[in-house]
Image (tube, rainbow, N blue to C red):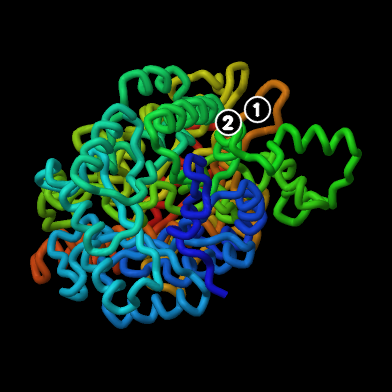
Amino acid sequence: MAMARVTELLAALDADASFYTFELFPPKTSAGLANLLSRLERLAALRPSWFHVTWGAGGSTQERSLELASLILKLGRPVCLHLTCTNMETAKLDETLEHCKRLGIRNLLALRGDPPRGEEYWVAADPEFQHAIDLVRYIRRKHGDYFCVGVAAYPEGHADSADKTSDVDHLRAKVEAGADFVVTQLFYDVDRFLAWYAECQSKGVNVPILPGIMPIQSFATFRRMTTLCQSTAPDDVLSALQPIAHDDQAVKDYGVRLAVDMIRRLRAAGLRGFHISTLNLERSVRRILDELDWVAPVQSSAKVAANALTNGVAHAPAQPNGEARAVTSSLVAVASQRQDGPESDFPNGRFGDARSPAYGDLDGWGVSLKLTPAEALRQWGAPATEADLSSIFASYIQGQLPAIPWCDEALQLESAAIMSDLLVLNSDRHWWTVGSQPAVDGADSTSREFGFGPEGGYIYQKAFVEFFCPRRHVDALVAEVEALGRGTRRQVTYYAAPRKDGEFRTNMAEGDANAVTWGVFPGKEIATTTIIEEMSFKAWKEEAFAIWAEWEHLYALRSPTRQLLRSTGDERWLVSIVHHDYRDPRALWRFLDRVWAAAV
């Protein structure tokens, strides 16, 4: 049965009623998608007007996006599926649109999508689809008014636009081509948005415009997203965030207050619909709606919890994923108060629990270099030898380069403790590192180098490092681990795999997980922020080698640099190794010295 179109949903609302939508992304792992179901039920109970489901460039997440959309439809909630025309062939698009019809999806968000961010030599897979407007026209020509089609807008100008003053004209053209509504990119400068919105109205953009609201979940995510989207970070926002940047909970609390203030200002200016990017996290979203008093007739989380205590309603036993599921659907919000297990409502990216619904591409950009081709070429030049590649990695570690393909931010302060070790690996051994941390034994939680969370806590870390190295060096590493005494063999654990599927090495048992960073705080459960285990390593391996390909595509097809990057990516293995003696800061690095001595 087909769901209602967005235009029909809006027509059914009172003329001045506020409404909101939720955006979700398909988790990177099958376990994450499975565990999203209970969170999805709770989000649906908050009664968004519809859900958005994102779509990877060229349909890279097609199967998971459609599966997630189907789950939402089964909950009786309308869905808007994002579609990108980048690397999208006509036959694949036709197949997707017919699949949408079979599922009952009638709402689409037509996007150009970005060419692979490092693809200097990118050519559209189908010349018919160069821009989002081409997608809008095609859908209208082939399917008439069956689909309700939305488009994106950029209040501060599209990141790739050479003439940002013409962006509103491009938006109007998309509306004239048949777009029914507009969803904007995230922003934090309300004044700039309102000036842009007034320009849209003056130029005849007469369809509903939904401001994109992304609650700040962590300082790192905030900085990353504002950089990627080239969004302004107002001075007052930065001033509020910088003193609490190390405390994720304090940042989330501020993010809720900021989102509420933004929505209230926008609502007072006449905006009534809001597109909330959840990042598959529910708690901030629910708190925002509680503060706005927009969750009626569904009870707020506080009221639900109070009623549960008053009425003595029992709960089901804890489920295997660690979440306490409520017996009645009216109590699903209570279950989300738990912070343990894969249902944790903190950002859960590269080093989080791969079973979490929030595990995956928190920035929404997917696999990419996170730099424009011109900037990437400026920073990394045209390496011709392995020594040139080692020089790029070493220059990044020394702060002489601001980024490498796998890391687009400077090293954290904690890396100063192991900088000399990292330079040895990258410069002398040509083991190119993409992740690391030093051992820490009870640092103060307010420490600038190692701290996180509230005051009065203690931080612990096991040393680990991830790097690309030749297969023969992996053989030496495995042999050195096996040579350890029976009582110390499990002191060192590792995962290793090449680009090509089918080969994989580890001394971890199936289902084992390494907690390598944790904090102990007064009156709280132990907080484990960094986990390395097989599922997350394999997901990261796929992404890490895909980034090799992105880097490769910066260069002409038969150029020496492209050939070097292709052959190197094919030959190297990704290794993740942890030493579990966190009280000895030199333990991991002494072990790697032995591996190197055996390898050469």
Looking at the image, residue 204 sits to the left or right of residue 56; the answer is left
Secondary structure under the numbered disc 2 in the rendered image: strand
Residue 227 occupies quadrant: top left
- Judge by depth and name the residue closer to the eye, 448 or 336: 336
Q: Distance between the residues labelled 1 and 2?
A: 8 Å
Give the residue pinned by disc 1.
Answer: 520
Q: Position of residue 370 (x, y in %)?
A: 27, 48
Say if residue 480 shows up in the picture: no
- Tell me the quarter of the image containing the N terminus: bottom right
Looking at the image, residue 444 sits to the left or right of residue 258; the answer is right
Rendered position, 141 above or below 181:
below
Looking at the image, residue 11 sits to the left or right of residue 312; the answer is left
Q: Nearer the viewer, mark 1 or mark 2?
A: 1
As shown in the figure, which amino acid type bears the numbered disc 1? Val
As shown in the figure, which amino acid type bears the numbered disc 2? Tyr
Sort mark 2 into few (<14), some (14-19) or many (20+) by Cα contacts within 10 Å.
many
Say if residue 433 shows up in the picture: yes
The reply to whether discs 1 and 2 touch (Cβ–Cβ < 8 Å) is yes
- Judge by depth and name the residue closer to the eye, 115 or 587: 115
Q: Which residue is drawn at 54% across and 32% down?
A: 584
- Judge by depth and name the residue closer to the eye, 297 or 23: 297
Number of numbered discs present?
2
Which of the two discs, 1 and 2, labels the residue nearer the N terminus? 2
Q: Position of residue 307 (x, y in %)?
A: 82, 36
Rendered position, 190 above or below 467:
above
Q: Residue at x 38, y 27 (%)?
A: 413
Give the residue pinned by disc 2.
Answer: 460
Residue 193 occupies quadrant: top left
- Tell me the quarter of the image containing the C terminus: bottom left
